[in-house]
Structures are given as C-alpha cells and as structure tokens.
Image: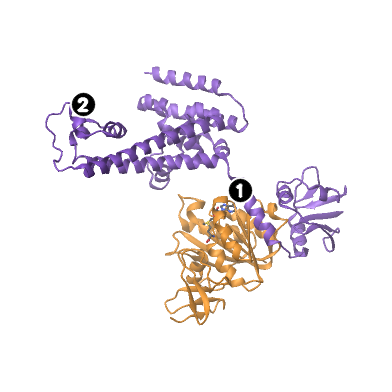
Amino acid sequence: MTYVLVRLDGLYIFDDDINNFKLKELSFDIKELIDIESRKLPDKIKELIKDDYIFIGQKFENYRYTDDVKIIRKALEKVKDRYNNELLLNLLKEKISNSVSKDELIIQAIRFLDNLNKSINLIVEMFREWYGLYFPEISQNIEDHEKFVKTILNKKREDLIKEYNIKITMGGKIFDEADYNILNNIGSHLYNLYTLRKNIEDYIEKLMKEYAPNLSEIATPNIGARLIALAGGLKDLSSLPSSTIQILGAEKALFMHLTKKAKPPKHGVIFNHPYLQKLPQKARGAMARTLASKISIAARADINKDIIYDKLKAELDRRYEQLKNRK
Amino acid sequence: MKLKPLKENKNIFIDDKGRLYTKNLVKGQKVYTEKVFKYNNEEYREWVLKKSKLSASIKKNIGLVPINEGDRVLYLGIAAGTTASHISDIIGNDGMIFGIDIAPRILRELVPIIYKRDNIIGLLNDSDKPDSYLHIVPKVDIVYQDVAQPHQIKIFLENIDYYLKNRGYGFLAVKARSINVAKDPKEIFKDVRKSLEDHSLNILKEVRLEPYHKDHAMFLIENK
Ligand SMILES: C[S@@+](CC[C@H](N)C(=O)[O-])C[C@H]1O[C@@H](n2cnc3c(N)ncnc32)[C@H](O)[C@@H]1O
C-alpha cells in the first residue's frame, strides 16, 4: 500500500509503514489551495495518483482515504517544516473576501436600522424639548414624532398658529431669525433621517424578497431579516429546530428561565408578527408554535431555492382563522 | 520600574507591581490597548491580565510556562491575536504560530498584525475539522485553545490527536458559560478534567482565572 499526503510543498508519497517518503515538489496558487480544502483535487495532483494510493486524512471525492489517527500523526512527523507566508496571507485575504455574503448585508442593515431608530428617537426627543420653547402647543397636539417633524418643517410659528387655530401661545417672545433657523435646521436633518430609515427598510424588504422569498412571505421581511441576524445566517436558521426559532430573540428570558427558574419564554422576535399581535393572549402560544414551524420549513426551502410560500401561507392562514374563532 | 525575567519562563517579564510583559518582536507595533515602552534599550509590551487568559493563568500560578524560542504552536481561536502576539514575542522569529479561527470578521483584524509578524500564519478554518488544515499545519510543540464553544473539549482533543508531538504541551482555556449556562462552573471544570484524563493526557495544572476572567479556568496538559 502507498499512502499520500498533500502539503503546501507538494505530494508526499509514503511507503507502507510511513517510515520513508518521496516528495513530489509542487507549488499551488490560491485557487488550488481553496480547491484542496473543499476536497477537489487539482489536476496536477490527479496526474500523480495511482489506483492503490490512499490519502492520509484527506477525503477527496472518488479517492481512497484513511482517517487513522496513528497514520496521520506519523506522517506529520515526517513532513518538512516549510511555509510560504505570503501565499498563506493572500489565501487568508481571499477567504475573508469570499465569506462576505447576503446574510452579512442583511445582518448589518437590520442592526443599522435598529440603532438608527434609537438615535432618531434620542434626537427627536431633545429636539421637541428645545422646540417647546418656541411653540409648545404644536408639540402637545402631535404625539407622533415623525408627523411632528414633517408638520413643523420649514414653517414659522405664525403659519402654524393659523393652521391649528391657536390663539395665545406659551412660546417665548425672544426668538429672532437665528434662534428659529437652528431649530428648522435640526428639523430638516431629522426629516432626512426619517427618509434614510425608510430607504433602509425598503432595501431590507427588497433584499429579503430576493434572497429568502419563502421566509419573507411567512415571517414578513423585517422579522425574517431579524431571524437571519439572530441565527447568524439563513443556513444556520434553516438548521435550527422550530422550538428554538420560536424563542430566538428571547435569550435573556431563556437565561432567566434556566438559571433563576423563571417561566420559559413563549416567543422571541416572532412575537411582532401581525398574526400574533392580533390574536388574544391565550391563543398566541399555539400560533407561535405553528408560525415557528412554518418559518423553519420556509428557511429550508429558501436554502434549496424552492418556492413554496403559497402553500405555506395558506396553511398558516388556516391556523390563524382557527385560533381566531376558537372560544 | 524594574523588570525581571519570570522564573517560569525567561522570555516573560514581571515588574515590581506584579504586571507581566514580553519583549516586542516588532518594534513600534502595538497590537491591542497594551502599553508599549522602552526599558534598558529594549521595547516591551504589557501583557494585560484582563485581556489574555494565558497571562491571567501565569499570574494565577500555573507554575510552568513551557513555551520556548523556536516552538511550533497550533492556536485554536486566535481571534485578533491579542494573546497570540505575546506568544509570538516569546517564540521569536524561529518559531511559528498556526492560528485558526472560524470567524472572518475577527480575522480581518488579525491581518494587519500578521503583516509585520512573520511568525504568525492566520487560517480561516473550523478547528472542529482538523483535517481541513492537514496540508498546512505541521506537528507542533504546543496546542493552545480558546474557542469558547460547547464542544470545545472534543475540538481540543481531536487537534491534539492530529498535531501535538509526544510530550508536547496543551493549554486549554475553558469558559464555563459557553459549555453550559445553567451548570455550576465547578462541576463543568470537573467534567473537563475527567475528559482530559480519559484521553490519557497528563494534567499538569488547573487554575481558575478569577478575578481577571469570570468563570474561566486554564488547564495545562502534557501529551504522553
Ligand atoms: C474568546 S475568543 C479568543 C480570544 C483569543 N484567544 C485571545 O486571547 O486573544 C474565541 C474565538 O474562537 C473562535 N472560534 C469559535 N469557534 C471556533 C471553531 N470551531 N474553530 C475556530 N475558531 C473558533 C471565535 O471566532 C473567537 O474568535
């Protein structure tokens, strides 16, 4: 028997008891190194392999191999201690570059969106406080932040007073042009931030519908994106049991359950799904279970590039109607 | 300030306040937030106890630091190279670290460090598949592992079986939380000890890493 081992410096051809070897020196480029790792044999090695050769620990398709640890250890004791640092550094860079995926884009986008929301809320609250010195009545009239910003943008107090029929304002009299301008300036930046938020939401929706159409339909694009982010990728999500999917995003509650004997969580981010939101409390657990199991199937279909969301959606809808009508 | 070599390892230094240092292999390079400074015409880097489980374990009297100039080291979970950079200082230009990590994002931070440190090779691989780097990694003097994974012991043992020389050393940093959040760390470390012994490894020392790393322990083993 003849054992062989592919190394950076070539093909090691060992005798029966791994005591002696011949080295067929070869050099590989990055593509070949990536092939070797994904267990595709570069042509220049194929040429050298005879039928009775057995690869040591390296399982190339259609070739014989052994995973006997004793043989692996012994072979490694013999091989030469030589490395091409520059090649390996370039290999690392190439692999990092190849790792950037749509998953990554979704994860960054959803994380950015959440933090943008937090930032907007912080800024808008401070803005409303400041603006209250100028014209508090309008702030008291409009609770919704975005609507508030859109209402006051590029308008003076005089216009708003008429528009909202407010006779006497508590706003300060000392406002001159500069005092007003800075407020309007902040308002216009906030307006842009709301536009940015909308653009990111649209982007996520479009990306999700292309990348994970089944998941988007069943979970909604937004929740689907969050599930992908929480699982670390679509592939990871698709391999989770649906009981885990059901509580993704509720890790803190789960931790409290495991360590402090608190109640186990019933749902994580899927809690925000419109069907769960619309159902009464007591029906939500059952809905969450069904939803999680459909999500799991949808994610697997997305990995396999199947389109099955019509059927899944119909099943989900049926369950929802059932639970809605249950007394 | 006065620096003295440590009795456990002459390439690790200690000052009168008990802080640890290594001699910087790459002049002027700072790898993380450590202090870099000149002393007796040599450049040193502080080995921050809270940033490295290895320096914390030395501080907590692991007793033996068998890392020598010229050593080959297989480092599983090298991340951004915080600890590896100090090992790199210790083993010098004749040594070599093969640093495996599964996360491309963190390896992005390692790349600029490798540019200047010729004794570190970074590999984007899953250390749970030790055969995936059989064409690159040689037999090593030391296997160092810090991957914070539920099945980290299995990973450690597999890599030892493949790559660690007879009578080579292994450092295993265990984070109880990653193995099981609900279980008492003491119990977890007991289980680890048992798995290592069942694999017929000599456990030379086990130290807890508090207060520098909560619920962590470092095991130093020797291959038979
Ligand atoms: C706690 S960090 C290591 C910190 C580092 N040892 C230091 O002290 O500078 C754990 C690292 O293990 C990596 N990791 C987790 N699972 C892994 C696996 N199966 N194979 C390789 N690396 C893994 C993670 O990506 C992470 O970078």
Residue located 46% across and 78% down the image: B15
Query: Callout 1 environment at 10 Å: few (<14), some (14 to 19), or many (20+)?
Result: few
Residue toward you, A92 or A53: A92
For residue A273, side relative to residue A169 (left or right) = right
A210 vs B156: above or below: above
The chain that appears purple in the image is A
The residue identified by callout 2 is A163
Where in the figure is residue A105, as x and y percent of width and height?
A: 52, 41
Chain letter of mark 1 equals: A
Q: Residue at x 54, y 64 (%)?
A: B83
For the view shown, which residue lies furthest in the left direction?
Answer: A168
Q: Could you tell me which quadrant the C terminus of chain B lies in? A: bottom right
Coordinates of residue A322 in the picture (x, y in percent) = 44, 18
Task: Respond yes or no on whether mark 1 lies under 8 Å from ligand 1.
Answer: no
Q: Secondary structure at mark 1?
A: helix
Sequence-first tag of 1 and 2 = 1
Chain letter matching colour orange: B
The residue that mark 1 highlights is A97
